[in-house]
Every structure is written in structure tokens, then in C-alpha cells.
Amino acid sequence: MNLPKPHIAFSGSPIDRADHIRCDPDALAGCMGWRARLLMLDGLAPVIDDAGMLVWGTLADCDEDADLVFLGMMDEKPCFAAIPDEGATGPSYANPQIWAAIQALAPPDLALYGGARSLVDWHARHRFCARCGSPTKLAKGGWQRDCAACEAQHFPRTDPVTIMLVTHGEGEDRKLLLGRQPRFPPRAFSALAGFVEPGESIEEAVAREVLEEAGIAVRDVTYIASQPWPFPSQLMIGCHSHADEDALTIDETELEEARWFSQNEVQAAMEAGRDGNGPFAPPPPAAIANVLLRWWLDQGK
């Protein structure tokens, strides 16, 4: 079966981030007029209309004392979003409104929402200086926070996470290592993943995480694709690697189960879908792990 190359969710935002405006206070002030658009949010969740599109308002739709971040320009109009009173307080998978939105929004809207969510969530959770504890204020249209007390500058962060395929064997005998965490839905398996630690290259992070979680040494790490993941603000770095041995030693604090799957099993699972009766439930289409599995299947054709 020829599986189409899917779009990577949360990528491809149609907005121009317009750094030249965010760095110019006068130009930014000039954007705060009647032409400006306000992305409507319910806390951190998107507001969606009956057509399944993001809802936009005007600056009159937010409180007078609201802190606004400048998202950029779209259709020659400045776009803003308001910082909510609270940032993320729990796991994203526990919010059904968020996951319903992921399924409903078209790719450009999903990418725009994901970027806005990451930015306003960071502001909501970083109102005080990490250096001296004093309150901080928005700068550069919301792409920076400054501390007046100690003059420290703080910037929205993105945490790099490696998510990796591990292959053993060649040709028709090749198989793929997948794992499941305790929080996964029943029968769900996905690629192993973990944060890149300080002082590590991407390749080193892949090797360390696979060894820690599954007891497997890998080699020949290569990059495949990446995905911005706004829960809260990660960059998923998709990689591929090879293992010479297949004996597993599972770290049960990280994984509930890890297994090798044949190419036929992965193919059947992807064809059956997440709610089908395949050998396992594959990652959802919005996750880069789904893209990686499709890529791996294509390599065997």
C-alpha cells in the first residue's frame, strides 16, 4: 500500500513573525489600532467557529489591562493574543477540548494556534525573574521579558526532545522497536523519546535515551524530520538509528512495555488506524511519531 506523505502537524504557520516590527516600539505601537486582530482563546484552548476555524476578534474584545503578545502579520493585519491568568497546570492529554481542536483545525490554523499557545503559556508561567525573583515586563512585543530590578532578559524557551526509531535487521527481516508509557491508551505503542540534556548532541541524546529505556545500544543516528509541539513548548527531533542486538532490558519507571514489531505488523497497524484491530494502536496522525512510522515503511518498499 502506498501511504501518502502526511503534513507535520503544528508546522507551516501562515503568519509572518515580523521581527522588524516587534523590535521597533514605534512600529509596534502603530499596530495597536482598529485593524489589529485578536486571536480568541479560552484560557489556553482555541475558540473555534462552526466551520472549524479559529475565531478572531479585535483589541476591543480583551480587557484594558490585558498583556498582549504580537504574533506577527497576516493578510497585512497585525495579529495579537492575550496572556491568560494562568499557564498550563496539568498534562495536555487530560484536556479533551485541546485534543478535539487538534482534530478539527486545518493545518495552517493548527500551526498558528500552536505557536500562539506556546508563547502565551510561557508568559503566564514566567512573570517573575529567574535571577532575582522580581516581576518582569513584556518586551519586543512579547518575544522577551525584562527585569527592571537586575536588568536580566528572558526569552521564550523551546525544549529539544529526540524521538527515535530503532531498527534491527535488514530487508524483510527488519523490525522496529516501539514502547508504551503507562499513560498511553490501551494497545498504543509509539517511538521512544526523551529530552536532550545539557552538553549533549542530538545523536548522543538518542543513544543515551534508547540505552536507558530499553537497554539497547544504537549506531548510525540520522535525522528525519522535526515538529513543534506546544505542550508546553517542545521541538520534537525525529531520528532513525540501528541496533546490532535485540535483547531488551526495559526501564519500568519510563516504559510499561517495549517490543519489536515486524514490517508487516507496523504496516497492518497503520492501515487499521488507531481505533482498528491491528497488532497495536499507532500514534495519532497529529504526532510526529506517526510520520516517522510512515517514513520507515516507505524505506522498505
Image: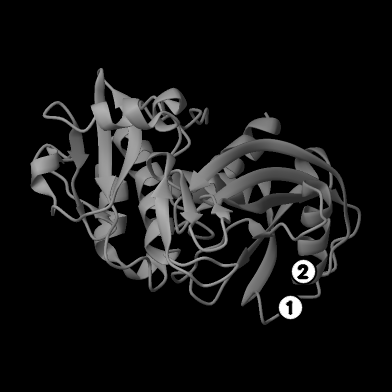
Q: Quadrant of the C terminus?
A: top right
The answer to which of 119 and 19 lies nearer the viewer is 19
Label 2 Cα neighbours within 10 Å, binned few <14 / some 14-19 / many ≥20: many
Mark 1: few/some/many CA within 10 Å (<14, 14-19, 20+): some
Name the residue located 61 percent from the left edge and 77 percent from the top edge. Answer: 256
Which residue in the protein does label 2 denote?
214
Q: Quadrant of residue 49?
A: top left
Residue 274 in view: no
Q: Position of residue 198 (x, y in %)?
A: 77, 59
Q: Are marks 1 and 2 in contact (CB under 8 Å)?
A: yes
Q: Amino acid at mark 1?
A: Asp
Seen in the picture, residue 86 relative to 80 is either above or below; the reply is: below
Q: Secondary structure at mark 2?
A: helix
Q: Residue at x 21, y 33 (%)?
A: 32
Q: From where the camera sits, is residue 297 visible?
A: yes
In the picture, residue 98 is in which quadrant?
bottom left
Please provide percent x and percent y for residue 38: 19, 40
**Could you tell which of marks 1 and 2 lies nearer the N-terminus?**
2
Query: According to the image, label 1 marks what residue?
Result: 251
Question: Does residue 1 appear left or right of residue 106 in this picture?
Answer: right
The residue nearer to you, when weighing 174 against 81, is: 81
Three-letter amino acid code at disc 2?
Ala
Q: Position of residue 8 (x, y in %)?
A: 48, 36
Residue closest to the eye, 144 or 176: 144
- Looking at the image, which residue sits at the far front? 149
Residue 13 tag number: none
Q: How far, Cα to Cα, is label 1 from label 2? A: 6 Å
